[in-house]
Image: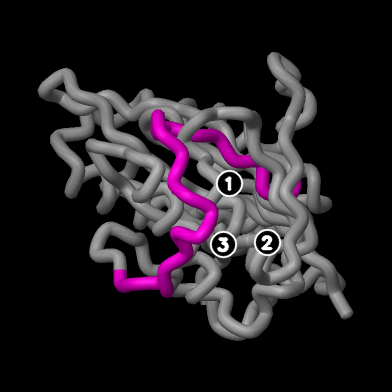
Amino acid sequence: MRNFRLFAVGIGGVLGMVGLLNAMALAQTPAPDDDINPPVANCNQIPDTNAGDKPPPAKIVATPITADLLDGTRAHVLAVIEHATRRIRILGVTLHPTGEWTTQQARNLIMDIGEQAHQIKFMIRDRGSNFTASFDAVFQATGTRILRTAVQAPRMNATCERLVGTLRRELLDRVLILGERHLHAVLTGYQAHYNTARPHQGIAQHVPDDERDGIRGAVTDIDTQQVRRKPILNGLINEYTRAA
């Protein structure tokens, strides 16, 4: 049976996840250990339109990053990234992150993964106070082991750190974010691009939703064949495919 690795990243505040789920925290007061409620619908969660029957990540990691809005406030985002495939899931966006909010994103993730949640072997997180005991308990209930990164050790969260840098260079530093809903919409578009069209060196230039054993497309001779351009996020990013 396949094992999965998932990394979680906080975009816009003190949230994130690292290594096997390396998570970072935002809240100040830990919730009681028995504060484990069933998942509820989250209107801020970005739908995973490409999930299909794909298996869940095996390692999850978290790290913090802020998204500054046009009015000067900062939005907070929680995302996870699967280590093996580099596939990301943006779990939620909020202006007021709390320990309860972070825990609820974990519940929503487990609900989304469903019966395959037990395949998540590790969740790596940092020592931020926002990842409370109830946050850990959501994963521990499925048999996931919680691992915390050492203090000031970014190499323990390298995949997640790379994702944060990518999000800043390709998206957040190049767009004026008007508000929480705008950030939500922008991340929705980027998530689809990242998972279905953006190749990664760490997985042999495949894209996250590719079949790992599939053959990569051959180089196209633009002198003899037409190339079609698909603008993403109003032309901020472009995807190129061979015309039929």
Q: How many marks?
A: 3
Which of disc 3 and disc 1 is earlier in sequence?
1
Residue located beneath label 3 in the image: 138
Give left or right: position of 242 versus 83.
Answer: left
The answer to which image quadrant residue 69 occupies is top left
Q: Is residue 38 above or below residue 29?
A: below
Residue located beneath label 2 in the image: 140
Q: Which residues are magenta?
A: 20-41
Query: 198 and 137: which one is in front?
Result: 137
Query: 89 and 176: which one is in front?
Result: 89
Q: SS at mark 1?
A: strand
Give left or right: position of 202 versus 88.
Answer: right
Residue located beneath label 1 in the image: 8
Residue type at mark 2? Gln
Asked if the magenta segment contains residue 42, the reply would be: no
Residue type at mark 1? Ala
- What's the distance in space between the residues labelled 3 and 2, CA to CA? 6 Å
What residue occupies the far top of the structure in this picture?
Answer: 152
Q: SS at mark 2?
A: helix
